[in-house]
Each structure stands twice: as structure tokens, then as C-alpha cells.
């Protein structure tokens, strides 16, 4: 007698449950997706002890008659596909026909369903039918899953805490609510309603219910399409960020999926708009021919494979970046409702005229404290501070002379960077020059605080401008242009070549990546088995930093699994821009400040540095008057 035997259906269902039913949220997912496929407009989910005790899902979908209800617990029983070709035209969320059988095999399940012509009641325990009788029920389905994993104690043992398991379920239900705003979704846990949507199709109302009305108001709608795909959705303003990519929700033909390459395209759309390791809130719908997507690649159908993926990624990145660019704003110091008030005369705090003792007095210490607090909260990438002068420096005034030695030193830093007239900056994204200038305020330079922040004013208040972030943005756009197209006519031959030594395996990697390094201005020549020399480099490399830059670019190539020329160019431009940008405690005269602001005004994106930090912050006149209690 042979050793190989065919497993019975009960055992095979229990094994399949190991892939399909990982935790209570997996049960909720399968049951809710079935409800959506049934055409439900209302789905209610009731949990006890995060679903470990019981899960109940009630919908008003098409329901089932008695025959279909019995068949639904057979493995691979489905109404979604009939022949092989249907597998490549799937528009439903479920199609394998194994979810109910798998869930029933590891739980005590009660099914009550009706197609409008009479209902049926089924009770199953561990996959075995225990009760079967007719029942009175409106059209729809009511499924209760109790004592999940009661017959698989090992699975039950490794479940997490109630809070963790509940968190997984809430996360999934939130995604479904976002993906199907036309369905009223209600989630109740231990009698407490955690989420309830009205099903009116207003996505922003669902966003407000999940992320809060404050954040929902800062979500930008976007849409775009190419020959194969159509996309639309909502993306948060750069000022709204999270520490995790989990706030990006992606739906492909109505199916919520996890697609890390698309997440990267979304993150790339926010490049230089967000601080490092911060991510946006994005809701993205992708629609396309089902034949372009393969959904049968993951046991829980969390992942899909897409045809013509590069074209889709470009569409996503370009569309979202365009939406952000059109509404980019300067961060406000604080947002408050502005009451109706009578206008007050602006006081010149720098050259105050003689006034009675009751007139408010400019408090330098108060303003300095506020500035330091704001800078510490906004800063993500901290630049090294230059040594503080031994003698305390006052807040610089535009009319105050700058010492001769300091002025000459600062002027040399500015002279290294070509002016806007001398160099044309590349476009980060297509944007008209007038459009940038229209968004950037026309300000009047007032002075400088602690050699770090430039103070500028206009009619509606004043601005604090981070001088390091401002010049970093200007230099970044300059070097981005240079690195993007290394010109043979802009090379400097060295009298004494630079020599670099590496381990044998690293040397092999560098030999393979020589062309990529040449794209960013690093020209390596082999010098022995594991050594290289550099005989020339571009003339626009920051002076005095050439060897360090070459070493860092080589290290990036060695540390990367795969050399990405586009990323290497970007990293090179960011690194060079940060090298010799003016630092904190670096005093400027009025001419230097005006030149910096004018160059910044002509930048493609003058509002954030390459690391995503804000360049300038706006204080409204009302906020200043509020600080001094001039308005209540």
C-alpha cells in the first residue's frame, strides 16, 4: 500500500486556515470583503475582546439561499470565477472560495442569511455542521465567529494582547471605510463605537472621522491618468507628517494592498518637502484594466503585481508632486481665529520714537526665547554651530555696521555661490518663474537674530528666515543642475592626484560602479589591485571639501546594494549643498542678506531645505499683538 494519501476536507481546511486566518483581523477582513462583494451599503462589525471572544459582521447585501449557504462552506466554492480566463479579469475582493471553510474549521461559527425569499440558520463547530434550520431574516447576512482558535491552542497562545489585536482590526476597518466611502461602516468593540461613517460617498468626511477634522482640511485632492491607469485621491500638505508609512492607503481596483514600490513613489513625490524619516498621509486609488494586475500572489491577497509598473510610478509621483507644488505654503507660527478688531498703528521696535511710559517696550529676551523654541521644534537636521564670539553680540540691525573682518569673511562664502544671473537653476518640477515669485512674499529686510535668523517684514506681519536652510536650498538647486550633467569643460586637473585604498571586495564593487561615479563627477583610475587615483574633478566641487566629497560618494556606492544613479546624484547634490552653507552664529550685513533672499526667491522651491525643514516661518501681526496683550 502506498504511503501518500489524500487528506480529508476537514484537515485540508484546517491547514488552509493557517495561511488565511492569522489573527482576528484576518477574519474581519474576509467577512467584510464578502459583504462588499455582495453589494452591501451598510456593514456593522461587533467585537468582543478584540475578536478573541466573538466577531459579528452584519450586512444588507444580496444574501444567500439555503443551497448556496451550505455550499459556501465547501472548499474552493465561489461565485466569483467559473473558468480559467476569469482569473485574469477579477474585479471582486474574494475569488478563491476558501475563506469561510477555513474560518469555520478553527472556530464556532453561526451563519444567518437570506436572499429576501426566506432565510437559513447554520451553526458549525470546528468545521462540522451542527445545526441547520430555516429562520426569518431580512435580506442580507449575519455571521458570528466565536472562540476563534479554540481547537488550535498553539495559534491562540501566540496571539498578542487585546490592544494589539484590536489595533490590527481598527487599521483594516479604517482602510475599508476610506476605500468605500459610499458604504456605511460601523465598528463596535465591547459596546463602544470606535468608527461610524454615513456612507454618503464623501471621502473627506471619512478622513475627518479617522484622522481628525484638522488634518482632513489639509488634505489635497489630486487626479491624473495615462494610457493604462487612472489615479485619484488625497495627499496631505507637507506640514502634516507622520513617523510611519502606515498612513499611506493604496487601493488597486478597489482592493486595499501593500505595495512598497508605490509607497516609495509617493515618498519621492514629497522629496525635499518633508524632513528625514517623516511621511505624509496619502489616500490613493488606482484604477486600470484587471488584466494589468495579478492579485493571486499572496495568501491573504495583501499584495498585487502590476504590469507597466514604471509608467504607473511616474504618474503617481508627478501627479502628487504637482498637487503639492500648486499649494505649497509658508508655515505659520501659530494658527488662531482672528476676531474683528480696530486696526492699530504699527510701532517701529528698532528705532522707537519717544513715547509715554505706558507704551509697550520691545523685549529682546522674550523674542529670542520664542525664536529658539520654534527653531528647536522645527529642526530635524541640526547643522553644527560656529563658535560663539567671546563678546556677546547684540541683535544685528540693518543700519548697524558689520566689523570689517567679519564682513570680508562672510562675503567670501557668498562669492563661491554664483548669483541667479550667473547660473540657471534646473526645474525640480515644471513651474513658471512668475508662479514661484507669486507665492514667495515680497519682504523688507529688518535685521538678524543671533547670527542665525534673518528678520523680514511686510504688511501682514514678519518672517523669520533660517539663513542656513535658505542657502542650502539655493546651493542644492545649483549642484543638482551640475551633477545632473557633468561637463567635460568644467574639470580641474590635479598637480598631485588623490589616492584611495580599499579592500579587495570593495575594489571589485568600485570597478563595476565606475560609470555611475563618473555621472556625479568622480573619475577613478585603477592604481594596482585595490587602489584608485583621482587625477581630476569638477571645478564646481566645494573648495577645500573635494577629497571628503569623493570619499563620501564612494562610500554611498559601497554601502548600497544596487547603484541607483538618480539617487546618487540627488545625495551628492544634498551633501555638497550642506558642506559650506552659512551656519548659525554667522553674522551677515544687509547686502548679503538681501542677496540671499533674492536668490531664494528665484529658487524652484524656496520654502523648504533639501532635508524638508522649513526655510521661513510667518508671524502674523495679530499673533505678535496677541503676545503683547494688545488684542484679546
Image (cartoon, rainbow, N blue to C red):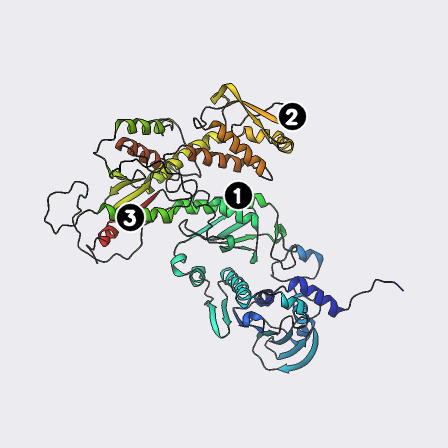
Q: Residues within 10 Å of mark 2 (few under 14, many from 20)?
A: few
Mark 2 sits on what residue? 529
Left or right? Give the position of 347 relative to 442.
Answer: left
Q: Residue at x 63, y 27 (%)?
A: 530
Q: Residue at x 66, y 82 (%)?
A: 133
Question: Looking at this rendering, what residue extends furthest in the front direction?
Answer: 390
- Observer-side mark, 3 or 1, equals 3
Q: Nearer the viewer, residue 424 or 587?
A: 587
Helix, strand or loop at disc 3? helix
Q: CA distance from mark 3 to mark 1?
A: 45 Å
Q: Residue at x 55, y 46 (%)?
A: 312
Mark 1 sits on what residue? 314
Quadrant in which the N terminus is drawn: bottom right
Specify the quadrant of the image occupied by residue 66: bottom right
> Residue 509's spot in the image, x, y percent?
62, 33
Mark 3 sits on what residue? 369
Amino acid at each position: 500500500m502506498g504511503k501518500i494519501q489524500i487528506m480529508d476536507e476537514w484537515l485540508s481546511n484546517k491547514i488552509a486556515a493557517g495561511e488565511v486566518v492569522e489573527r482576528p483581523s484576518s477574519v474581519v477582513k474576509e467577512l467584510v470583503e464578502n459583504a462588499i462583494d455582495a453589494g452591501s451599503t451598510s456593514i456593522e462589525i461587533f467585537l468582543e475582546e478584540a475578536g478573541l471572544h466573538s466577531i459579528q459582521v452584519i450586512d444588507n447585501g444580496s444574501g444567500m439561499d439555503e443551497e448556496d449557504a451550505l455550499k459556501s462552506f465547501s472548499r474552493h466554492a465561489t461565485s466569483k470565477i467559473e473558468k480559467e480566463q476569469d482569473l485574469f479579469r477579477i474585479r471582486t475582493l474574494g475569488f478563491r472560495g476558501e475563506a469561510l471553510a477555513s474560518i469555520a474549521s478553527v472556530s464556532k461559527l453561526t451563519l444567518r442569511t437570506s436572499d429576501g425569499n426566506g432565510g437559513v440558520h447554520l451553526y458549525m463547530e470546528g468545521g462540522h455542521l451542527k445545526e441547520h434550520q430555516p429562520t426569518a431574516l431580512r435580506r442580507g447576512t449575519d455571521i458570528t465567529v466565536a472562540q476563534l482558535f479554540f481547537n488550535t491552542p498553539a495559534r491562540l497562545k501566540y496571539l498578542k494582547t487585546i490592544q494589539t489585536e484590536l489595533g490590527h482590526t481598527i487599521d483594516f476597518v479604517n482602510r475599508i471605510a476610506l476605500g468605500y466611502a459610499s458604504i456605511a461602516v460601523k465598528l463596535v468593540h465591547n459596546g463602544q463605537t470606535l468608527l461610524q461613517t454615513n456612507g454618503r460617498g464623501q471621502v473627506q468626511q471619512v478622513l475627518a472621522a479617522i484622522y481628525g477634522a484638522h488634518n482632513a482640511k489639509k488634505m489635497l485632492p489630486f487626479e491624473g491618468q495615462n494610457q493604462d491607469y487612472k489615479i485619484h485621491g488625497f495627499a496631505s500638505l507637507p506640514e502634516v507628517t507622520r513617523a510611519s508609512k502606515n498612513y499611506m492607503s493604496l487601493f488597486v481596483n478597489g482592493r486595499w494592498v501593500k505595495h512598497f514600490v508605490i509607497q516609495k513613489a509617493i515618498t519621492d513625490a514629497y522629496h525635499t518637502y518633508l524632513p528625514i524619516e517623516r511621511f505624509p498621509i496619502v489616500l490613493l486609488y488606482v484604477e486600470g484594466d484587471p488584466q494589468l494586475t495579478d492579485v493571486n500572489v499572496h495568501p491573504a491577497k495583501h499584495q498585487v503585481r502590476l504590469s507597466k509598473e514604471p509608467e504607473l510610478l511616474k504618474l503617481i509621483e508627478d501627479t502628487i508632486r504637482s498637487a503639492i507644488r500648486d499649494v505649497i505654503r509658508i508655515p505659520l507660527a501659530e494658527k488662531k481665529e482672528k476676531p474683528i478688531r480696530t486696526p492699530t498703528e504699527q510701532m517701529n521696535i528698532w528705532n522707537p520714537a519717544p513715547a509715554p511710559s505706558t507704551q509697550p517696550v520691545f523685549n529682546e529676551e522674550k523674542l529670542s526665547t520664542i525664536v529658539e523654541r520654534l527653531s528647536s521644534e522645527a529642526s530635524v537636521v541640526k547643522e553644527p554651530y560656529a563658535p560663539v564670539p567671546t563678546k556677546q553680540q547684540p541683535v544685528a540691525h540693518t543700519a548697524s555696521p558689520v566689523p570689517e573682518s567679519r564682513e570680508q569673511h562672510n562675503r567670501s562664502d557668498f562669492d563661491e555661490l554664483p548669483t541667479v544671473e550667473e547660473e540657471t537653476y534646473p526645474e525640480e518640477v515644471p513651474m513658471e518663474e512668475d508662479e514661484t515669485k507669486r507665492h514667495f512674499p515680497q519682504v523688507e529686510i529688518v535685521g538678524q537674530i543671533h547670527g542665525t535668523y534673518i528678520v523680514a517684514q511686510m504688511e501682514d506681519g514678519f518672517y523669520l528666515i533660517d539663513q542656513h536652510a535658505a542657502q542650502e536650498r539655493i546651493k542644492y538647486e545649483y549642484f543638482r543642475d551640475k551633477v545632473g550633467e557633468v561637463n567635460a569643460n568644467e574639470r580641474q586637473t590635479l598637480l598631485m592626484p588623490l589616492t584611495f585604498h580599499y579592500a579587495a571586495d570593495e575594489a571589485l564593487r568600485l570597478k563595476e560602479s565606475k560609470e555611475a561615479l563618473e555621472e556625479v563627477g568622480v573619475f577613478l583610475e585603477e592604481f594596482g589591485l585595490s587602489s584608485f587615483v583621482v587625477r581630476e574633478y569638477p571645478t564646481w566641487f566645494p573648495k577645500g571639501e573635494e577629497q571628503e566629497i569623493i570619499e563620501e560618494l564612494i562610500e554611498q556606492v559601497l554601502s548600497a546594494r544596487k547603484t541607483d544613479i538618480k539617487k546618487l546624484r540627488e545625495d551628492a547634490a544634498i551633501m555638497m549643498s550642506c558642506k559650506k552653507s552659512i551656519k548659525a552664529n554667522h553674522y551677515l550685513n544687509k547686502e548679503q542678506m538681501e542677496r540671499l533672499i533674492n536668490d531664494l526667491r528665484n529658487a524652484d522651491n524656496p520654502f523648504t531645505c533639501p532635508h524638508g525643514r522649513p526655510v521661513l516661518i510667518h508671524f502674523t501681526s495679530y499673533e505678535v499683538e496677541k503676545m503683547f496683550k494688545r488684542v484679546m
